[in-house]
Amino acid sequence: QVQLVESGGGLVQTGGSLRLSCAASGSIFTVGAMGWYRQAPGKKRELVASITNGGNTNYADSVKGRFTISRDNGKNTVYLQMNSLRPEDTAVYYCNAGLRLNAISRLRPYWGQGTQVTVSS
């Protein structure tokens, strides 16, 4: 069974840091772009950061300079280093990845179950 499993969420104070990890497990042929989304209560899910296989990154304006996305292709894992956290960063963070499960299939989007990040004032 192919899964994306997030870890690293928790409760921190304003100004603190967290490092989120998301590992794709199972039989996977190719991992394409990977990214992190978040959804706060009453709000739509939004892109936080993404990274391509070639290492090109994209960030939401609200997290530029504070968050860093990276990946380890050997481990099929994407990370999100979050520094200088603010209460408005509080949300469920979801991992996303484009995965090919065999040589003749196309990349399809997969989602993790989410990990809670809470930043106290």
Image (spheres, rainbow, N blue to C red):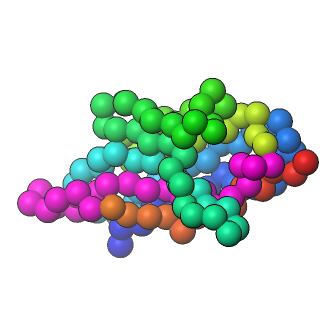
Residue at figure coordinates x 83%, y 36% from the top left = 15
The answer to if 10 sits in the magenta stretch is no
Q: Please say if 12 is above or below 55.
A: below
Name the outermost residue toward the top.
65
Residue at figure coordinates x 76%, y 34% from the top left = 84
Q: Could you tell me if residue 62 is visible in this image?
A: yes
Q: In this view, does 36 lie to the left or right of 53?
A: right
Q: At which x and y percent is residue 10?
A: 76, 55
Residue at figure coordinates x 87%, y 45% from the top left = 13
Q: Is residue 117 left or right of residue 67?
A: right
Which one is in front, 86 or 75? 86
The answer to if 107 sits in the magenta stretch is yes
What range is drawn magenta here?
87-108
Q: Could you tell me if residue 79 is visible in this image?
A: no
Q: In this view, does 58 lie to the left or right of 114?
A: left
Give residue 42's quadrant in the image: bottom right
Give residue 51's quadrant in the image: top left
Residue at figure coordinates x 58%, y 36% from the top left = 61
Which one is in front, 92 or 2? 92
Name the outermost residue toward the left.
104
